[in-house]
Image (spheres, rainbow, N blue to C red):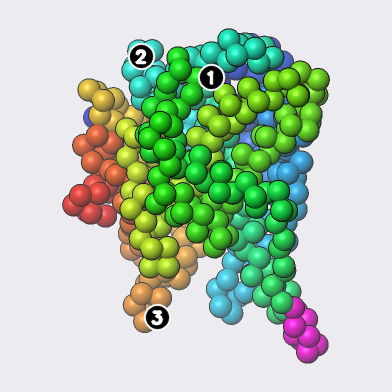
Amino acid sequence: MAKMKTGKLITTEEIMSELHFHDYISPGEERDRVLAACNKVLDTQASETYDQAKEREQTLDFIKALWGKYDCEQVAKKYDNFVKIEQALYGLERDEEKGGRYRDHFVHMFNTFVFGIRIISNLFGKVNENEGKDLFNVKNENLKSEHLPFGGNYNYKQRTFYLWMLISTFHDIAIPFQHMPKIGEGITRFVEEFGWVVSEPILTMSNFDSSQLYYYFTMLSEIYNSKLKLVDKGKKYDRSKGANSYVAKTLGRAFDRREHGALSGFFMWKTIEEIFLLGLSEKYRDKIGLKNFDSYDRYVLQQDIARAALAISLHTLTRKKETGHPEIIPIKFDEYPLTFLLILADELQEYHRHEGGTILGNTKFRCQPKIILSYEKKNIDLKVAFSIDAEEEKYFIEEANAIWSKRHNGKKFNDVKKAAKVIMGSICEHLIEKIILDDKFRLEIKLYKSTGNTIFEQAINTKTKDA
């Protein structure tokens, strides 16, 4: 595998060239808009002067452009409201005395999307069409044969891109639901100054949504059970094995715990359903209704949309005592590739991750990672390298100490290499808990100073748990 050169940061131009948007979006105004919006966010991130408000605004513009390409620009309103509540969470969860803080999830979803498309495009560039289809369990779409009124069928690359767009841009949309208790605590910190107390906000789910949950989790478990096998000329996922009660009940319990993965998956599925059920898409408002919604449900909602919802739901499962140590994880790339990729991208995404521990907030490090990927005989080797500059070291060490001192009775240190071992080592631990990393998918992560000196390097292996 090629050795990765460190020192010089990856540029916006280099990242944009790796995304290969031309493989997924046809030439024209839509592609130009997506490209321009993505470029602006990456440029802002690469700027020497970090501007979180500008980054957030431009990310919202990108979301509008991306969903607009799929005639669902109104979905961006959900993200607009997400940003508003997230801004409140920065203040409500900030507790300098206890070290409490909220960290960004909105721009994080953009960075997760970008990282994943870089990997997907890199892999597509190294394989032929049949290998590409096998890698991600996709085939060329054939929905026109079911008389659905779409402009055309997606090829396997476009279909993979759409799946990843759904998965990555929705995977944390329900984070505020999981943080409801902290919202009450944050308000209480103020009102208790005057002798008042605020209880946790009470949430009520609509009766119709709750009535769908058994059907919904059963459907996801059936797709899981077939390991994404496609039938009916690639139009359906095989569900002939029936439900997997273990998976359905595990995800249902996660939903009851307000685990944001289980909630986000359901909200994504419901959102896509409502766009066409309620005629929210301007382009398809009068084209999908009483006569053909059943076909849309059968060949879209119960297929790729459900697959995306499954990936989102699985990504937050952990082997903690209270969750019952679910045997669903760790995930293998060759069985559930996009779920695997979501977990990988999600856990590695500590860069450009704003954290509101103070009024100003901070980030551990600000750089899109360098990537080197090789593929041979169905085996994948991936190297991911991050950079940290001198200005970021102080906060990086502080955050490492926050982790270290809890484990070692308040002991602290002031060494960036030690900090790298703590923070990057923690990432490694989370990865080997959730995904299988072995000879079929090898991963090495590196952190280096902007001067080029490597301060952390680890090849991660699930079996030996080198991390």
Image mark for residue 16: none
- SS at mark 3? loop
Q: Could you classify mark 3 by the number of other residues whose Cα lies within 10 Å: few (under 14), some (14-19), or many (20 or more)?
A: few
Which residues are the magenta region?
A: 190-198
Q: Is residue 122 visible?
A: no
Residue on which disc 1 sits: 158
Kind of residue at disc 3: Gly
Q: Earlier in the sequence, mark 3 or mark 2?
A: 2
Residue on which disc 3 sits: 410
- SS at mark 2? helix
Task: Identify the residue at horizontal 46%, vertical 60% (top origin).
Answer: 396
Q: Nearer the viewer, residue 383 or 66?
A: 66
Q: Is-magenta flag for residue 123?
A: no
Q: Earlier in the sequence, mark 3 or mark 1?
A: 1
Mark 3 or 2: the one toward you: 2
Kind of residue at disc 1: Gln
